[in-house]
Image (spheres, rainbow, N blue to C red):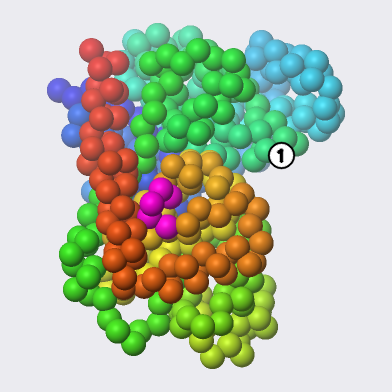
């Protein structure tokens, strides 16, 4: 009989937010484990048909006033509460705000633990793996009470918003040392992220901190097929794919395109978000009168539709001008799997993903640098130099981001801890 695993996600399999990574990893976990998915942040109306084939349950994280009061009182009986407060006071930065934030973090953690315990029916003699897909308050909630369940192995993944201090309110991640003490494994999706964590907490590099990159299953098209599919007289297709958030700096793509005068370029942005309308207005203002530049905002697409877009269109280049990147973005991995050259800023793991297959921009590029990168690739479109970049993208995908290899290796490591 397969060992039991509980996979704690945000919205997988009910929503689409984690389809590209948790959804890709799930089938491999099921080959070795009896997996039950616990989704925690599911928005009403986002459920879709995939849930019928997946053993999934919703354990909500929203709290009423009574829940908050009871959980706060319980949390204040925990030693972890005062350990964190002491660390905040010692650091002496935004002390009041950070203590308040830590108390709210712990309160939410305590509420979630109680609900998770009830939903799973775990007992002291339960033997299972609890795999937290995020290194957040839900993980901390169980970590506080891990000593009550000696037969349970606790695993967590960390990405970006749950790892870097600058990505958290008030510039600090909370309770990470306490969670670390109770974890069997803390899994990193990028070497950059692992290096940051080890340096931040003065950890030794041990097998407790394995590197297991995410991956995509799409094998895309071959180098030879790209040559055959190239169409003459068609505008160079530039694609970006991300939420429309200020941190993604999509406005820089618009500024860069505004400097491109001689190449015919069609830019398609996939994704929506709070800044979408402002970006559409800015694009109209700066690009609307340019005869050689076309642009289109197609909104959010499911992962399947994103991949279909790559199959149906001859994408000339992928671009991201993001300000920060916690790991190896799946959007770039998807482009690599189709042999698409990449333009990216030198942040996070992106410098390891753009090597001979595109243009690596400075961390904070200006519009001239972005425009020059677009002109460089668009100007070589269809040349041997261009197809060499395409081939290098495919090689990068096969060596680092092939889901079959990456998730098979992860599953094997998780199997080993149950023996």
Does any portion of residue 167 appear in the rendered image?
yes
Q: Secondary structure at mark 1?
A: helix
Quadrant for residue 171, please give it: top right
Question: What residue is at 63 percent from the left and 67 percent from the top?
Answer: 368
Q: Is residue 296 left or right of residue 390?
A: right
Does any portion of residue 276 appear in the rendered image?
no
Q: Which residue is mark 1?
A: 169
Residue 63 to residue 155: above or below: below
Quadrant for residue 305, please give it: bottom left
Quadrant for residue 131, please give it: top left
Residue that sits furthest to the front in the current view = 384
**Image coords of residue 329 (percent x, y):** 45, 48
Q: Which residues are magenta?
A: 354-358
Q: Is residue 43 left or right of residue 213?
A: right
Question: What residue is at 65 percent from the left and 27 percent from the top?
Answer: 174
State the residue in front, 365 or 202: 365
**Image coords of residue 336 (percent x, y):** 34, 55
**Image coords of residue 37 (percent x, y):** 35, 38
**Image coords of residue 364 (percent x, y):** 65, 53
Dominant secondary-structure state across the stretch colored magenta: loop
Quarter of the N terminus within the rendering: top left
- Does 237 appear in magenta? no
Residue 55 to residue 74: above or below: below
């Amino acid at each position: 009989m397969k060992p039991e695993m509980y996979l704690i996600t945000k919205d997988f399999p009910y929503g689409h937010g984690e389809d590209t990574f948790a959804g890709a990893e799930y089938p491999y976990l099921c080959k070795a484990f009896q997996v039950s998915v616990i989704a925690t942040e599911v928005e009403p109306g986002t459920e879709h048909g995939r849930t019928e084939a997946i053993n999934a349950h919703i354990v909500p994280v929203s709290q009423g006033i009574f829940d908050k009061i009871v959980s706060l009182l319980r949390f204040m009986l925990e030693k972890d509460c005062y350990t964190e407060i002491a660390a905040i006071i010692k650091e002496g930065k935004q002390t009041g705000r950070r203590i308040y934030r830590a108390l709210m973090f712990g309160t939410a953690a305590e509420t979630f633990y109680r609900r998770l315990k009830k939903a799973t029916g775990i007992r002291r003699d339960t033997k299972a793996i609890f795999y937290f897909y995020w290194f957040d308050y839900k993980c901390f909630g169980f970590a506080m009470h891990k000593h009550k369940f000696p037969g349970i192995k606790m695993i967590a993944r960390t990405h970006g918003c749950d790892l870097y201090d600058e990505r958290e309110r008030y510039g600090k991640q909370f309770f990470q040392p306490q969670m670390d003490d109770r974890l069997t494994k803390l899994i990193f999706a990028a070497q950059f992220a692992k290096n940051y964590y080890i340096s931040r907490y003065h950890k030794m590099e041990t097998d407790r901190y394995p590197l297991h990159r995410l991956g995509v299953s799409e094998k895309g098209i071959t180098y030879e097929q790209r040559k055959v599919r190239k169409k003459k007289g068609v505008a160079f297709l530039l694609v970006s794919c991300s939420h429309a958030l200020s941190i993604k700096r999509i406005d820089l793509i618009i500024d860069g395109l505004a400097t491109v005068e001689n190449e015919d370029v069609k830019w398609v942005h996939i994704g929506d978000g709070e800044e979408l309308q402002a970006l559409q207005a800015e694009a109209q203002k700066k690009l609307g009168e340019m005869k050689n530049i076309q642009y289109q905002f197609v909104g959010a697409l499911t992962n399947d539709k994103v991949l279909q877009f790559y199959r149906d269109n001859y994408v000339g280049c992928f671009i991201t001008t993001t300000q920060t990147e916690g790991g190896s973005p799946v959007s770039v991995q998807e482009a690599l799997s189709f042999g698409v050259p990449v333009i990216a800023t030198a942040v996070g793991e992106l410098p390891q993903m753009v090597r001979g297959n595109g243009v690596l921009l400075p961390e904070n590029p200006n519009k001239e640098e972005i425009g020059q990168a677009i002109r460089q690739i668009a100007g070589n479109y269809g040349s041997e130099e261009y197809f060499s970049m395409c081939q290098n993208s495919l090689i990068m995908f096969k060596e680092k981001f092939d889901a079959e290899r990456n998730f098979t290796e992860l599953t094997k490591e998780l199997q080993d801890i149950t023996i």
